[in-house]
Amino acid sequence: MNSRISARDRDPVFAIPLTLPAAGSGQLTGTLHRQLRAAIIDGRLAAGTAMPSSRKAADALGIARNTAVAIYDLLIAEGYLLPRKGARPVVADIAMRHPRARAAPKGAATQLRKQIVAPTWQSPSAAPHAPQPLPPRSFRLGVPEHRHFPHEIWRRLNARAWRRWSKHPFDHPPIEGIPPLREAIAHHVAFARAVACTGDDVMVTSGAQQAFDLLARLLVTPAVTRVAVEDPGYEPLRRAFQAAGARLVPVPVDDEGLRVDLLPTDVRVICASPSHQSPTGVALSMSRRAALLAHARMHDAVVIEDDYDGEFRYSSRPLDALQTLDRDARVFYVGTFSKSMFPAMNAGFVVSPSWARDALLAVKRVTETHSAGPLQEALAEFIREGHLARHIRKMTATYAERREALLEGLHVDLHRWLEAIPSIAGIHLAAKIDAGANLRAVVDAMHRHLPGAEVVPGDSTRPGAPSIVAMGFGVIDVEDIRPAIRRVSMMLSRNQPDGR
Amino acid sequence: MNSRISARDRDPVFAIPLTLPAAGSGQLTGTLHRQLRAAIIDGRLAAGTAMPSSRKAADALGIARNTAVAIYDLLIAEGYLLPRKGARPVVADIAMRHPRARAAPKGAATQLRKQIVAPTWQSPSAAPHAPQPLPPRSFRLGVPEHRHFPHEIWRRLNARAWRRWSKHPFDHPPIEGIPPLREAIAHHVAFARAVACTGDDVMVTSGAQQAFDLLARLLVTPAVTRVAVEDPGYEPLRRAFQAAGARLVPVPVDDEGLRVDLLPTDVRVICASPSHQSPTGVALSMSRRAALLAHARMHDAVVIEDDYDGEFRYSSRPLDALQTLDRDARVFYVGTFSKSMFPAMNAGFVVSPSWARDALLAVKRVTETHSAGPLQEALAEFIREGHLARHIRKMTATYAERREALLEGLHVDLHRWLEAIPSIAGIHLAAKIDAGANLRAVVDAMHRHLPGAEVVPGDSTRPGAPSIVAMGFGVIDVEDIRPAIRRVSMMLSRNQPDGR
């Protein structure tokens, strides 16, 4: 550690230039908050760095103590700072920069090793998506219901696959996935999502995350390629593109989804989750879908469509997938079975334009030789025999009830603090936190009574943008939803009689 | 396609500068062969490019036709050229460059897409390790015996794991692998290979290939980091480091293994397969192991120890793993269950120094969120209940017989053309092709009578170095080995009565 580093450790805030807005402009909190967040995101404030006490920061910046407190609260609520009992908050690892980006230009191994152990690396505990100790039934995101899964059927198919497999000589399954599974997936997405493809267009991956990583490695020229990502958006996808050296361009999301009109013309890759945006849950409107594809065509970009839980739809008229509307072979469609089946399946897939197929295969060959064969066979049968479609149909009904209860609770009990964001699919709902509400109070109430719910910044490009609460209903029972919501409402009312 | 490209298509050889040695130096074949191979390896001769006919090449270079033929034969035998029935041979995809390395600096998507579909990308068929249509029983490399595997036990443990799993709420298994498996692996490598580690040091990966990819992404600064790889060596490992942008430094291998004395002082990463070098099969001598670690210490490099089939040992005094000898936390030990169990398991692991643990985890988080949970549980039980150790013991005896038969055949029947390379472990044997032998004849005989056996260049840094034949005995029965060898011997004797 050289002196500059330790100096930063002492007072990180003073190591980065902060510009204060005109006095009385009412922009103070927002401006400082935005600048600090930027410093954390681009790593100028290294993960693990202890922030100065709010008093110290206030003095150093010549601002009111409560302003400093408010800024810290906001950063904590957004997950950019990690609170520590009775200690100064530390910078969370949002940056997640790739070791290459950090490795010493001279490449001396001593350097290299220092780089590798640099605190910017997230530790398992500090990981954004590290499993938190949550009660089994909670509002956590991205985890589907295990109670109604046809376990016996799955076990039977799995056992059968291993038995059949044991009769044949050992071999390496093909890197792109076994043909029966690729066929089955092609039929499934054609049927469930009107995605036009054949088995040849399908590559099986280790979950959606591997798909993102492979696509990033395929499409990104480090420090050159600009990649548009939704803001707010799915952090692990950003991480994959950041690691590949992409220049990320956050593009805001409103009630119609991605603000296509704000897409820069020089982005070569556009990442979108049109059926159920993560985390806001909004669906990309039909006109925006057309506009997005038109933009991609005009400016020669490719689109990565993340349809992570688009199978659960609650609208009579589902919107077509971008891949379905694409006439120009620009869309990579990414799907996963982690939500429609279970996370431990760890199976996902990419439907790619034929022009990219071999290249994608070559990239996968670099990172992995194949995925476990018999498991693929069992999955193929599960889909082919119609169990997946049946399960999705059944779960859509179950999730729909929970969703209704949650929506009702938001409207009836929490309308003073939260405004539900319209959505038509998925296994979570999001709501905007009223700009006037006491963010910290809302966050506390959520953490207390809606375990697993997450508060995320609404739009990192607009300081004033309301924060968002995302609530999953994959592992909460319908009868437990309203009571939990009421407890939140009671706690907030006590704390803010006027709703403010 | 611009004119330059098409010009190259017409006559690739003339697009690259070839230097002819002094007339009568006897170096002609070797020199031209080395230069052409270099051009293929670094991609100046793009994959898929059709070579000119040997006559045309001979005329253009002013060399004898049979010299051109000899060079083509050598490149074909080594896999750098792909022969085509009645057509000119085409350049195989050895280069395997990463799209980034190829992407247009301007990054225009049109460019980008052209780059992506550039022919340098290997198609599934052209893939070095694509499954060839081989008879079930053959001399193919890297595939273990399925007949003696305890399938019933495995199926029972697998079924039990899924049953137990079905009782619990769905969740994402930890990225680094489930604790019971990491513990079990730690005990296994401690017992089987005297590798000193705890479960905390173990990360579960999707086979050894993912381990190589993660380590490459962790340790390589693109275009900066120099990485020493064995020559000849394991192509998929090279591919992972090439894709990460490493500057590969091929280091020759002799009968004591890696030529540590030839290691440059500026390599930051040294890749070695000490127990059973791939493909020569030699074991790194004790003195070389000490020297390798000393070199790493003195020049501050890290070592990646690939112990891909070190469990099958035929010597009374096994050599310690580098990780065991390492006192300096420089060695990453990579293992796999693809050989000791079966390839479809697709499970491998890295034992890493504690200083790199979190960083490695962060890299894995980028590329994958976890590996299938219940499968990990079944594997953990398989190891913990001693089935793996028992299976390895049993198979070591079985493989030893096959190995003996193969060695005897080489000594008795093929000594005129082949010289067995000493080894003490693994499930394949390698032999040097006598410099005087007719390489093409040997290759033909191998392909005819030892299906699956592979011919690889002995040392790409020395043109004169003898080529090597690698013969697997994972899926060939002991009684079939000698007869096959005799057929090779008979064919070669007919073709070269004097053994030349």
Image (cartoon, coloured by chain):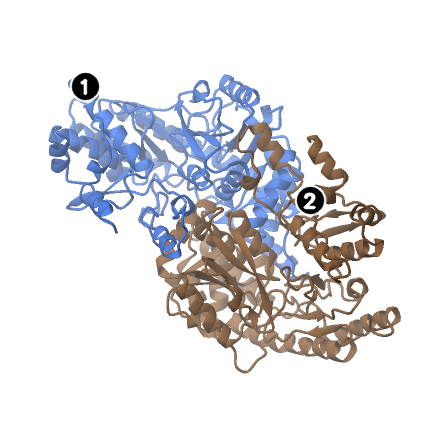
Chain colours: A brown, B blue
Task: Give B476 or B248, whichever is nearer the viewer.
Answer: B248
Q: CA distance from mark 2 to mark 1?
A: 64 Å
Residue B98 left/right relative to B378? left
> Can residue B164 be seen in the rendering of this structure?
yes
Quarter of the figure with the C terminus of chain A: bottom right
Q: Do the residues at pointers 2 and 1 share their chain?
A: no
Tell me if mark 1 has few (under 14), some (14-19) or many (20+) residues whose alpha carbon lies within 10 angstroms of its own.
Answer: few
Q: Which mark is residue B22?
A: 1
Q: Chain of mark 2?
A: A
Q: x, y (%) of residue A18?
A: 70, 49
Q: x, y (%) of residue A87?
A: 83, 46
Residue B443 left/right relative to B347? left
Point 62% across, 45% down: residue: B181
Q: Establish if B156 lies above or below B215.
A: below
Point 47% across, 68% down: residue: A292
Q: x, y (%) of residue B453?
A: 32, 37
Q: Amino acid at mark 2?
A: Ile
Residues at badges 2 and 1 in contact (C-beta under 8 Å)?
A: no
Q: Establish if B500 lies above or below B106.
A: above
Say which quarter of the image contains residue A2: top right
Tell me if mark 2 has few (under 14), some (14-19) or many (20+) residues whose alpha carbon lies within 10 angstroms of its own.
Answer: some
Q: Nearer the viewer, mark 2 or mark 1?
A: 2
Q: Chain of mark 1?
A: B
Q: In the displayed image of the protein, which residue is found farthest to the bottom?
A: A316
Point 20% across, 26% down: residue: B29
Q: Establish if A90 lies above or below B295.
A: below
Circle 2 residue: A16
Residue A409 left/right relative to B31? right
Task: Give B389 or A38, whichever is nearer the viewer.
Answer: A38
Q: x, y (%) of residue A459?
A: 64, 63
